Amino acid sequence: MMNKDALVVLHGFFQLPHLQKKKVVDAINDYFDSMDREPIRAAYDSEFAKLRADQPSFECKCCERSY
């Protein structure tokens, strides 16, 4: 069984439209298929930081809360 963090993320994944789910799966596959994962993670961390800077409050699909 998944821990609560993984369960929350999976719940959010199921809230996405089909095309967005595919993009998430593609990104996860790229990550796991790579032997050099750190640049991939750094790029997504950077994009997430930009999101937080541009939108200091946003609705999280995973936990259904606004931040």
Image (cartoon, helix red, strand yellow):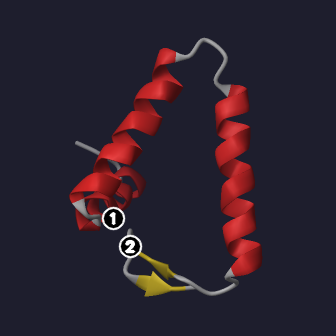
Q: Kindly state the secondary structure of the residue where label 1 is placed.
A: helix
Q: Nearer the viewer, residue 55 or 1?
A: 55
Amino acid on which disc 2 is placed = Lys
* Residue appearing at x 67%, y 82% in the figure: 55
Amino acid on which disc 1 is placed = Gly
Q: Which residue is mark 2?
A: 61
* Residue appearing at x 70%, y 50% in the figure: 45
Point out residue 10 in the picture as x, y percentages from the top left corner. 30, 54
Circles 1 and 2 in contact, beta carbons < 8 Å: yes
Point out residue 2 in the picture as x, y percentages from the top left corner. 29, 45
Please indicate whether residue 32 sits to the left or right of residue 43 in the image: left
Q: Reply above or below: 18 against 57.
A: above
Q: Which residue is mark 1?
A: 12
* Residue appearing at x 48%, y 26% in the figure: 30
Point out residue 6 in the picture as x, y percentages from the top left corner. 37, 50
* Residue appearing at x 38%, y 46% in the figure: 23
Please indicate whether residue 19 sits to the left or right of residue 35 in the image: left
Point out residue 33 in the picture as x, y percentages from the top left corner. 47, 17
Question: Hey, which quadrant is residue 14 in on the image?
Answer: bottom left
Q: CA distance from mark 1 to mark 2?
A: 5 Å
Q: Reply above or below: 10 against 51.
A: above
- Who comes first in sequence, dot 1 or dot 2? 1
